[in-house]
Image: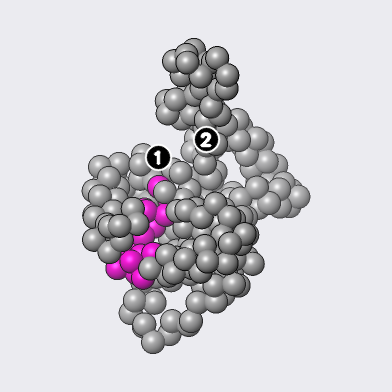
């Protein structure tokens, strides 16, 4: 979620990173935490208004997080139709339960919990009825969320037809590998590597401990490496 550090130029390149102002991993993490804290204050103000019946305030909250919600659903379910269903169900649940939301937790964590629970329900139903799975329309998925897909490995796949084909092949291999994960492992991997959440935050989203999340992430990564060792 944080932007890549900007490298210094000219004579400054000979200086240590801390002297030229290039943020390290801890600095980037602190900046991300500061942004989240500011967003939480803004969210809390909107939530208080929405809890009194201000629908415009709730609509603003939806607009803040709608792309994140849809992206999570698409990356987890790989079905535009299912993702739209999750999107509608998640925000409907958020609206109905908003009066009970307490401001001592972050809204995005609370919303992600709702979204991931709905996605988990879809994934479990899909596993129990694999015949119900529809073919994935890759172009339709990209139309829903124009950002680059999983791992963001291609710099500009549209600029080079061969690179675009290669990117599609890699994407298909990744999709098949992800299917080997359990629904919970898939959710954890998505929240960590695509949404950029820390393990503690993922634990809050899923209602479990940081250590449990860490173990699940380790298992998920090991499974993916077994399938995609040369790509990772």
Mark 2, secondary structure of its residue: loop
Is 18 colored magenta in this rendering? no
Q: Nearer the viewer, residue 197 or 37?
A: 197
Disc 1 to disc 2, C-alpha distance: 18 Å
73 in relation to 216, above or below: below
194 in relation to 120, above or below: above
In percent of width and height, residue 130 lies at 36, 82
In this picture, residue 79 sits left or right of residue 129: right
For the record, the magenta segment spans 174-192
Circle 1 packing at 10 Å, graded few (<14), some (14-19), many (20+), is some
Q: Nearer the viewer, residue 173 or 183?
A: 173
Name the residue: 58% across, 35% down: 40
In percent of width and height, residue 18 lies at 46, 16
Pointer 1 with pointer 2, Cβ within 8 A: no
Name the residue: 52% across, 41% down: 1
104 in relation to 100, above or below: above
In this picture, residue 1 sits left or right of residue 172: right
Majority secondary structure of magenta residues: helix
Mark 2 lies on residue: 4
In percent of width and height, residue 33 lies at 50, 30
Mark 1 lies on residue: 198
Name the residue: 61% across, 50% down: 65
Quarter of the image for residue 180 reads bottom left
Q: Which of 6 and 179 is in front in this view?
A: 6
Query: As drawn, which residue projects farthest toward the bottom?
Result: 131
């Amino acid at each position: 979620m944080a932007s890549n550090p900007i490298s210094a130029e000219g004579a400054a390149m000979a200086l240590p990173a801390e002297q030229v102002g290039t943020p390290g991993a801890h600095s980037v993490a602190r900046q991300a935490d500061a942004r989240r804290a500011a967003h939480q204050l803004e969210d809390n103000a909107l939530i208080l208004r929405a809890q009194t019946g201000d629908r415009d305030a709730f609509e603003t909250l939806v607009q803040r997080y709608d792309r994140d919600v849809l992206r999570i659903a698409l990356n987890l379910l790989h079905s535009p139709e299912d993702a739209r269903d999750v999107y509608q169900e998640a925000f409907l649940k958020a609206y109905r339960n908003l009066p009970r939301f307490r401001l001592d937790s972050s809204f995005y964590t609370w919303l992600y919990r709702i979204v991931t629970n709905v996605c988990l329900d879809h994934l479990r139903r899909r596993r129990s009825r694999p015949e119900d799975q529809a073919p994935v329309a890759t172009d339709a998925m990209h139309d829903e969320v124009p950002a680059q897909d999983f791992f963001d490995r291609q710099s500009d796949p549209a600029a080079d037809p061969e690179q675009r084909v290669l990117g599609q092949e890699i994407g298909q291999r990744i999709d098949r590998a992800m299917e080997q994960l359990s629904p919970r492992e898939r959710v954890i991997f998505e929240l960590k590597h695509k949404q950029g959440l820390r393990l503690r935050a993922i634990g809050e989203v899923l209602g479990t401990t940081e250590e449990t999340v860490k173990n699940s992430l380790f298992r998920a990564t090991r499974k993916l490496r077994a399938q995609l060792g040369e790509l990772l």
